[in-house]
Amino acid sequence: MVKQKPEEKARLHIDKLLEGAGWTIQDYPEFNLGTSPGVAVREFPLDSGFTDYLLFLERSAGGVLEAKPEGTTLSGVSEQTAKYLTGIPNGLPKVQESPPFSYESTGTETYFRDIRDPNTRSRSIFAFHKPETLIEWSSQPDTLRSRLKTMPTNHPLIREGLRDCQFEAIQNLELSFGDARQRALIQMATGSGKTYTWQEVYRAIQCTTPELKYN
């Protein structure tokens, strides 16, 4: 029995995760982009080398996925995937001039980055996104993190009806969103109106979702 190499073992796990998210896995050069909205083509040749997976969204290149053996520090692989994103051949259809999505994965750990984000950086995610999700994101003029960054300026918080502590909590939370911090904690005293303050979540949804009209 031939023992699998660590990277081959990782790819088996990655294939299952991609298929679970709705991707069709195909090999280069026998690929057919018309089989589904999301096609991940293995070992695709680019101007900058071979990417482990080139991700196609509705027949257009939308991103890359780099597979690494389990135990690899993925935060150090983002430079490699960035090189692949800029190395996609000119004759190949792309969702944008520069395809925005990159993944690094060991099959047990996965990082994701959207290069359009302000101060873009890779971040850990639980699962691969569905092709439909990336198609929707690529059609939007800016990213969620971009909209969060400009939310306080584009939609000033109305102070009327808010206590000072409530106004300060919401204001600081939005500044945290704008700094692309992945976690935030609001700590307020008993009786200070935490439930009312948490209506901020509806404001955030309205301000950052393009199809909703802000009131």
Image: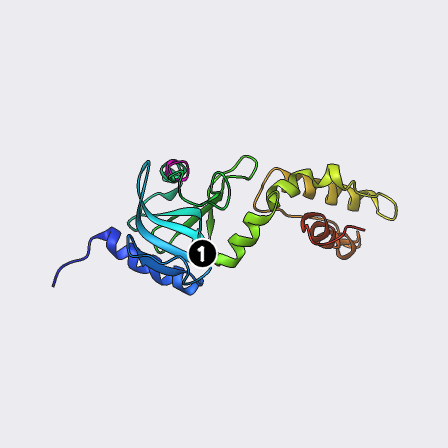
- Residue at the image point whose x is 65% and y is 43% from the top: 148
Residue identifier under label 1: 128
Q: Quadrant of residue 196?
A: bottom right
Q: Residues within 10 Å of mark 1 (few under 14, many from 20)?
A: some
- On screen, residue 84 versus residue 159, left or right, reads left
Residue 84 in the magenta stretch? The answer is yes
Which quarter of the rendering shows the N terminus? bottom left
Q: Going 53% across and 53% down the picture, which residue do you hit?
A: 135
Instruction: Give the color scheme: rainbow, by chain, secondary structure or one colour.
Output: rainbow
Q: Is residue 25 above or below residue 78?
A: below
Residue 72 makes an appearance in the image: yes
Spot the residue most to the left.
1
Q: Is residue 157 above or below residue 40?
A: above
Q: Residue at point 84% right, 47% down?
A: 162
Name the amino acid type tagged 1.
Answer: Phe
Does the stretch in magenta take in 214?
no
Measuring from the top left, give residue 200's x and y in whole percent: 73, 51
Position of 129 with respect to 171 (left or right) is left
Which segment is the magenta one? Answer: 83-87
Does residue 110 appear to the left or right of 6 in the view shown?
right
Q: Secondary structure at mark 1?
A: loop
Viewer-side residue, 149 vs 58: 58
Asked whether, in this view, residue 168 is left or right of residue 134, the answer is right
Residue 58, image x, y percentages: 47, 55
Kindly report the secondary structure that dominates the magenta region of the rendered protein: helix
Q: Position of residue 76 (x, y in %)?
A: 37, 38
Q: Is residue 103 visible?
A: no
